[in-house]
Image (cartoon, rainbow, N blue to C red):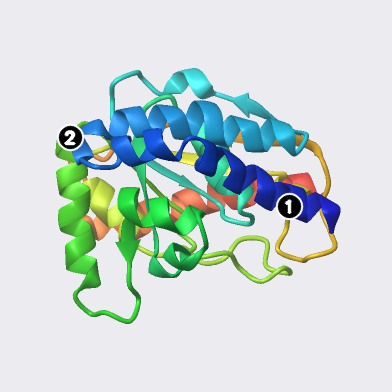
Amino acid sequence: MLYRIWFYLLVAVPILAFSPLLLLTTLSESTYSQFYWLARNIWAKCILLGMGCWPKVQGRSKMEPGKNYMLVANHTSMLDIMLMLYISRNPFVFVGKKELAGIPVFGFFYKRVCILVDRNDANSRMRVYKSVQRRLQQGLGICIFPEGGVPEEHVLLDKFKDGAFKMAIAHGIPIVPMSFLDCKKRFPFRFFSGGPGRLRVIIHPIVETNAKTKKEAAFIKEIVRKTILRDLENDTK
Protein backbone atom coordinates (compact mmCIF):
# COMPACT_ATOMS: atom_id res chain seq x y z
CA MET A 1 0.00 0.00 0.00
CA LEU A 2 2.84 2.40 0.88
CA TYR A 3 4.55 1.65 -2.44
CA ARG A 4 1.36 2.54 -4.32
CA ILE A 5 0.72 5.71 -2.31
CA TRP A 6 4.33 6.74 -2.94
CA PHE A 7 3.75 6.34 -6.69
CA TYR A 8 0.75 8.68 -6.68
CA LEU A 9 2.72 11.24 -4.68
CA LEU A 10 5.54 11.07 -7.23
CA VAL A 11 2.99 11.62 -10.01
CA ALA A 12 1.30 14.59 -8.35
CA VAL A 13 4.05 16.50 -6.53
CA PRO A 14 6.22 17.40 -9.61
CA ILE A 15 3.09 18.46 -11.49
CA LEU A 16 2.06 20.76 -8.64
CA ALA A 17 5.61 22.04 -8.12
CA PHE A 18 6.12 22.90 -11.79
CA SER A 19 2.50 23.82 -12.57
CA PRO A 20 3.32 27.44 -13.61
CA LEU A 21 5.84 26.19 -16.19
CA LEU A 22 3.52 23.40 -17.30
CA LEU A 23 0.66 25.84 -17.77
CA LEU A 24 2.84 28.18 -19.82
CA THR A 25 4.03 25.36 -22.08
CA THR A 26 0.48 24.09 -22.67
CA LEU A 27 -1.05 27.42 -23.64
CA SER A 28 -0.22 26.73 -27.29
CA GLU A 29 0.69 23.72 -29.41
CA SER A 30 3.77 25.66 -30.55
CA THR A 31 5.35 25.20 -27.09
CA TYR A 32 4.70 21.46 -26.87
CA SER A 33 8.39 20.61 -27.30
CA GLN A 34 9.17 22.55 -24.12
CA PHE A 35 6.37 20.76 -22.29
CA TYR A 36 7.70 17.44 -23.54
CA TRP A 37 11.18 18.24 -22.22
CA LEU A 38 9.73 18.89 -18.75
CA ALA A 39 7.55 15.77 -18.88
CA ARG A 40 10.43 13.55 -19.99
CA ASN A 41 13.39 14.90 -18.05
CA ILE A 42 11.72 15.85 -14.78
CA TRP A 43 8.32 14.18 -14.35
CA ALA A 44 8.93 10.76 -15.90
CA LYS A 45 12.47 10.33 -14.57
CA CYS A 46 11.49 11.44 -11.05
CA ILE A 47 8.74 8.81 -10.99
CA LEU A 48 10.81 5.95 -12.41
CA LEU A 49 13.85 6.59 -10.24
CA GLY A 50 11.74 7.45 -7.21
CA MET A 51 9.98 4.09 -7.55
CA GLY A 52 13.32 2.31 -7.75
CA CYS A 53 12.60 1.25 -11.34
CA TRP A 54 15.60 1.72 -13.61
CA PRO A 55 15.08 1.30 -17.38
CA LYS A 56 17.31 -1.02 -19.38
CA VAL A 57 16.80 -0.27 -23.07
CA GLN A 58 18.11 -2.21 -26.07
CA GLY A 59 18.17 -0.57 -29.51
CA ARG A 60 17.63 3.10 -28.55
CA SER A 61 20.00 4.34 -31.30
CA LYS A 62 17.70 3.09 -34.04
CA MET A 63 15.48 6.20 -33.78
CA GLU A 64 16.94 9.16 -35.65
CA PRO A 65 16.87 12.58 -33.93
CA GLY A 66 14.38 15.01 -35.44
CA LYS A 67 12.33 12.31 -37.16
CA ASN A 68 8.75 11.47 -36.20
CA TYR A 69 7.61 7.89 -35.63
CA MET A 70 4.59 5.84 -34.64
CA LEU A 71 5.58 4.28 -31.30
CA VAL A 72 3.71 1.13 -30.25
CA ALA A 73 4.15 -1.19 -27.27
CA ASN A 74 2.25 -3.59 -25.05
CA HIS A 75 0.25 -1.92 -22.27
CA THR A 76 0.18 -3.39 -18.77
CA SER A 77 0.80 -0.61 -16.25
CA MET A 78 0.69 3.12 -15.56
CA LEU A 79 4.49 2.98 -15.69
CA ASP A 80 4.20 2.45 -19.46
CA ILE A 81 3.55 6.18 -19.91
CA MET A 82 6.65 7.27 -18.00
CA LEU A 83 8.78 4.58 -19.60
CA MET A 84 7.78 5.62 -23.13
CA LEU A 85 8.68 9.23 -22.32
CA TYR A 86 12.04 8.07 -20.96
CA ILE A 87 12.81 6.06 -24.11
CA SER A 88 12.08 8.63 -26.80
CA ARG A 89 14.18 11.78 -27.02
CA ASN A 90 12.08 12.69 -30.05
CA PRO A 91 8.93 14.53 -28.86
CA PHE A 92 5.70 12.64 -29.44
CA VAL A 93 2.02 12.91 -28.50
CA PHE A 94 0.03 10.15 -26.81
CA VAL A 95 -3.28 9.03 -28.29
CA GLY A 96 -5.29 7.78 -25.32
CA LYS A 97 -8.76 7.19 -24.00
CA LYS A 98 -10.82 10.14 -22.83
CA GLU A 99 -11.56 8.56 -19.43
CA LEU A 100 -8.04 9.29 -18.14
CA ALA A 101 -8.81 13.01 -18.25
CA GLY A 102 -10.84 12.51 -15.08
CA ILE A 103 -7.78 11.62 -12.93
CA PRO A 104 -7.10 14.45 -10.44
CA VAL A 105 -4.06 16.66 -11.21
CA PHE A 106 -2.71 14.34 -13.96
CA GLY A 107 -5.94 14.56 -15.97
CA PHE A 108 -5.83 18.36 -16.20
CA PHE A 109 -2.63 18.32 -18.26
CA TYR A 110 -3.43 15.01 -19.97
CA LYS A 111 -6.43 16.47 -21.77
CA ARG A 112 -4.45 19.57 -22.78
CA VAL A 113 -1.54 17.78 -24.44
CA CYS A 114 -2.84 14.37 -25.58
CA ILE A 115 -5.13 13.36 -28.42
CA LEU A 116 -8.23 11.93 -26.73
CA VAL A 117 -10.35 9.09 -28.07
CA ASP A 118 -14.01 8.89 -27.07
CA ARG A 119 -15.17 5.34 -27.71
CA ASN A 120 -18.82 6.36 -27.35
CA ASP A 121 -18.61 8.99 -30.07
CA ALA A 122 -18.86 7.77 -33.66
CA ASN A 123 -17.13 10.91 -34.96
CA SER A 124 -14.19 10.59 -32.57
CA ARG A 125 -12.10 8.56 -35.02
CA MET A 126 -12.19 11.27 -37.66
CA ARG A 127 -11.25 13.96 -35.14
CA VAL A 128 -8.34 11.83 -33.95
CA TYR A 129 -7.15 11.34 -37.53
CA LYS A 130 -7.16 15.11 -38.16
CA SER A 131 -5.41 15.80 -34.85
CA VAL A 132 -2.71 13.25 -35.67
CA GLN A 133 -2.19 14.83 -39.07
CA ARG A 134 -1.79 18.29 -37.53
CA ARG A 135 0.67 17.09 -34.89
CA LEU A 136 2.77 15.25 -37.47
CA GLN A 137 2.94 18.43 -39.54
CA GLN A 138 4.37 20.10 -36.43
CA GLY A 139 7.20 17.56 -36.44
CA LEU A 140 5.94 15.42 -33.55
CA GLY A 141 5.68 11.66 -33.33
CA ILE A 142 2.67 9.67 -32.15
CA CYS A 143 2.39 6.97 -29.47
CA ILE A 144 -0.47 4.48 -29.37
CA PHE A 145 -0.82 1.37 -27.22
CA PRO A 146 -2.57 -0.80 -29.84
CA GLU A 147 -4.33 -3.07 -27.34
CA GLY A 148 -6.67 -0.15 -26.73
CA GLY A 149 -6.29 -0.39 -22.96
CA VAL A 150 -4.78 -2.57 -20.26
CA PRO A 151 -5.90 -6.21 -20.67
CA GLU A 152 -7.01 -8.44 -17.82
CA GLU A 153 -4.29 -9.78 -15.55
CA HIS A 154 -4.20 -13.28 -17.07
CA VAL A 155 -3.91 -11.98 -20.67
CA LEU A 156 -0.28 -11.83 -21.80
CA LEU A 157 -1.02 -9.67 -24.86
CA ASP A 158 -4.45 -8.64 -26.07
CA LYS A 159 -5.53 -8.32 -29.70
CA PHE A 160 -4.31 -5.18 -31.46
CA LYS A 161 -6.63 -2.57 -32.90
CA ASP A 162 -6.04 -1.22 -36.41
CA GLY A 163 -5.76 2.51 -35.68
CA ALA A 164 -2.02 2.91 -35.11
CA PHE A 165 -1.09 0.92 -38.21
CA LYS A 166 -3.64 2.53 -40.53
CA MET A 167 -2.57 6.00 -39.43
CA ALA A 168 1.13 5.18 -39.84
CA ILE A 169 0.51 4.00 -43.41
CA ALA A 170 -1.80 6.93 -44.23
CA HIS A 171 0.85 9.43 -43.12
CA GLY A 172 3.89 7.44 -44.27
CA ILE A 173 5.65 7.40 -40.89
CA PRO A 174 7.78 4.47 -39.65
CA ILE A 175 6.47 2.21 -36.89
CA VAL A 176 8.70 1.47 -33.89
CA PRO A 177 7.54 -1.69 -32.07
CA MET A 178 8.64 -2.08 -28.45
CA SER A 179 8.33 -4.84 -25.87
CA PHE A 180 7.88 -3.75 -22.24
CA LEU A 181 8.87 -6.80 -20.20
CA ASP A 182 8.68 -5.69 -16.57
CA CYS A 183 6.07 -2.96 -16.06
CA LYS A 184 3.39 -5.43 -14.98
CA LYS A 185 5.77 -6.90 -12.37
CA ARG A 186 6.81 -3.50 -11.02
CA PHE A 187 3.44 -1.75 -10.86
CA PRO A 188 0.43 -3.86 -11.90
CA PHE A 189 -3.17 -2.77 -11.46
CA ARG A 190 -3.62 -5.29 -8.63
CA PHE A 191 -3.47 -3.15 -5.51
CA PHE A 192 -1.27 -5.13 -3.09
CA SER A 193 1.45 -6.05 -5.55
CA GLY A 194 4.53 -4.74 -7.33
CA GLY A 195 7.96 -3.60 -6.24
CA PRO A 196 11.16 -1.90 -7.43
CA GLY A 197 13.52 -3.34 -10.02
CA ARG A 198 14.66 -2.99 -13.62
CA LEU A 199 12.36 -2.16 -16.53
CA ARG A 200 13.60 -3.97 -19.62
CA VAL A 201 12.63 -2.64 -23.03
CA ILE A 202 13.39 -4.13 -26.42
CA ILE A 203 13.15 -1.71 -29.36
CA HIS A 204 12.62 -3.79 -32.48
CA PRO A 205 13.67 -2.97 -36.05
CA ILE A 206 11.71 -0.09 -37.48
CA VAL A 207 8.86 -1.00 -39.83
CA GLU A 208 8.82 1.32 -42.83
CA THR A 209 5.40 2.24 -44.22
CA ASN A 210 6.38 4.03 -47.43
CA ALA A 211 4.62 2.53 -50.45
CA LYS A 212 2.38 0.46 -48.16
CA THR A 213 -1.39 0.44 -48.69
CA LYS A 214 -4.20 0.41 -46.13
CA LYS A 215 -4.90 -3.20 -47.08
CA GLU A 216 -1.47 -4.11 -45.69
CA ALA A 217 -2.21 -2.57 -42.29
CA ALA A 218 -3.72 -5.80 -40.92
CA PHE A 219 -0.65 -7.79 -42.00
CA ILE A 220 1.78 -5.31 -40.41
CA LYS A 221 -0.34 -5.27 -37.26
CA GLU A 222 -0.09 -9.05 -36.88
CA ILE A 223 3.67 -9.07 -37.56
CA VAL A 224 4.22 -6.44 -34.86
CA ARG A 225 1.96 -8.25 -32.41
CA LYS A 226 3.73 -11.59 -32.95
CA THR A 227 7.09 -9.90 -32.42
CA ILE A 228 6.06 -8.45 -29.05
CA LEU A 229 4.22 -11.63 -28.02
CA ARG A 230 7.31 -13.73 -28.70
CA ASP A 231 9.34 -11.57 -26.31
CA LEU A 232 6.70 -11.83 -23.60
CA GLU A 233 6.39 -15.61 -24.00
CA ASN A 234 10.16 -16.11 -23.90
CA ASP A 235 10.43 -13.95 -20.80
CA THR A 236 7.65 -15.92 -19.09
CA LYS A 237 9.49 -19.18 -19.84
How many residues crowd mark 1 within 10 Å: few (<14), some (14–19), many (20+)? many
Q: Secondary structure at mark 1?
A: loop
Q: CA distance from mark 2 to mark 1?
A: 34 Å
Q: For residue 164, which numbered disc appears in the image? A: none
Tag 1 or tag 2, which sits nearer the N-term? 2
Say whether residue 178 is visible. Answer: no
* Three-letter code for the amino acid on which mark 1 is drawn: Phe
The residue sitting at 72% across, 68% down in the picture is: 153
The residue under label 1 is: 187
How many residues crowd mark 2 within 10 Å: few (<14), some (14–19), many (20+)? some
The residue sitting at 49% across, 62% down in the picture is: 147
- Residue 23: give x, y in percent of width and height: 34, 41
- Residue 208: give x, y in percent of width and height: 30, 35
- Residue 235: give x, y in percent of width and height: 76, 45
Q: Is residue 129 above or below residue 173?
A: below
The residue under label 2 is: 138
Q: Quadrant of the N terminus?
A: bottom right
The residue sitting at 44% across, 70% down in the picture is: 99
Q: Secondary structure at mark 2?
A: loop
* Three-letter code for the amino acid on which mark 2 is drawn: Gln
In the image shown, does 211 or 82 lie closer to the viewer? 82
Residue 201: quadrant of the picture: top right
- Residue 28: give x, y in percent of width and height: 20, 40
